[in-house]
Image (cartoon, rainbow, N blue to C red):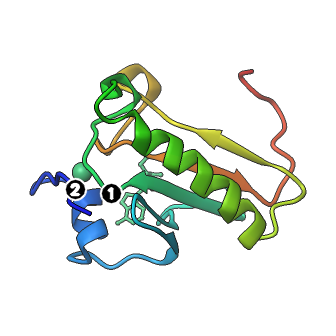
């Protein structure tokens, strides 16, 4: 499988193995690893192997990556025993606080989430 990479992108470097990560799951389309600064007892990042900047850059040509990432999240929830529930978040752009410009889904679990936006 050929994936488009951005040489200056942190998560592309993690996918290529140029920067180490605590891998949780991998398939042809997606890579998942533990967040370096966890916000919950379980905090996993699920990223497409092809470079997409954010949810705002999803279109007809690349939306299969997002579907595969969501499939991967469901698999990871079983693999990591997240039967108590989990939250999926994707920050897009400055107002949402996106810091890494490669599409990623935060999977948060292991505690009651408390106050919420939605
Ligand atoms: P966001 O703020 O939504 O763009 O999320 C970026 C996430 O990437 C943050 O939760 C960071 O803690 C996480 N992060 C940054 N660098 C690394 C790294 N080298 N390994 C794992 N997670 C990272
Ligand atoms: Zn990237």
Q: Residue 13 vs residue 82: left or right? A: left
Front residue of 27 and 31? 27
The numbered mark, 2 or 1, whose residue comes first in the sequence reads 2
Specify whether tag 2 is near ligand 2 (CB below 8 Å). Answer: no
State the mark number for residue 14. none
To which residue does mark 1 refer?
49
Q: Residues within 10 Å of mark 2 (few under 14, many from 20)?
A: few
Residue at x 35% of width, y 28% of height: 58
Q: Residues within 10 Å of mark 1 (few under 14, many from 20)?
A: many
Residue at x 53% of width, y 68% of height: 34
To which residue does mark 2 refer?
3
Residue 1 found in image quarter: bottom left
Q: Position of residue 55 (x, y in %)?
A: 40, 29
Q: Quadrant of the C terminus?
A: top right
Tell me the element at label 2: loop
Front residue of 25 and 44? 25
Quadrant of the picture in which ligand 1 is shown: bottom left
Residue 39 in sight: no
């Amino acid at each position: 499988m050929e994936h488009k990479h951005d040489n200056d992108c942190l998560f592309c470097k993690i996918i290529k193995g140029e920067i180490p990560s605590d891998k949780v799951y991998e398939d042809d389309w997606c890579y998942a690893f533990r967040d370096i600064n966890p916000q919950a007892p379980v905090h996993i990042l699920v990223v497409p192997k092809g470079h997409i900047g954010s949810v705002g850059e999803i279109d007809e040509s690349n939306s299969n990556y997002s579907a595969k990432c969501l499939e991967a999240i469901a698999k990871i929830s079983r693999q990591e025993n997240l039967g108590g529930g989990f939250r999926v978040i994707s920050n897009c752009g400055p107002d949402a606080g996106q810091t890494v410009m490669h599409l990623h889904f935060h999977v948060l679990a292991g505690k009651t989430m408390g106050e919420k936006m939605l």
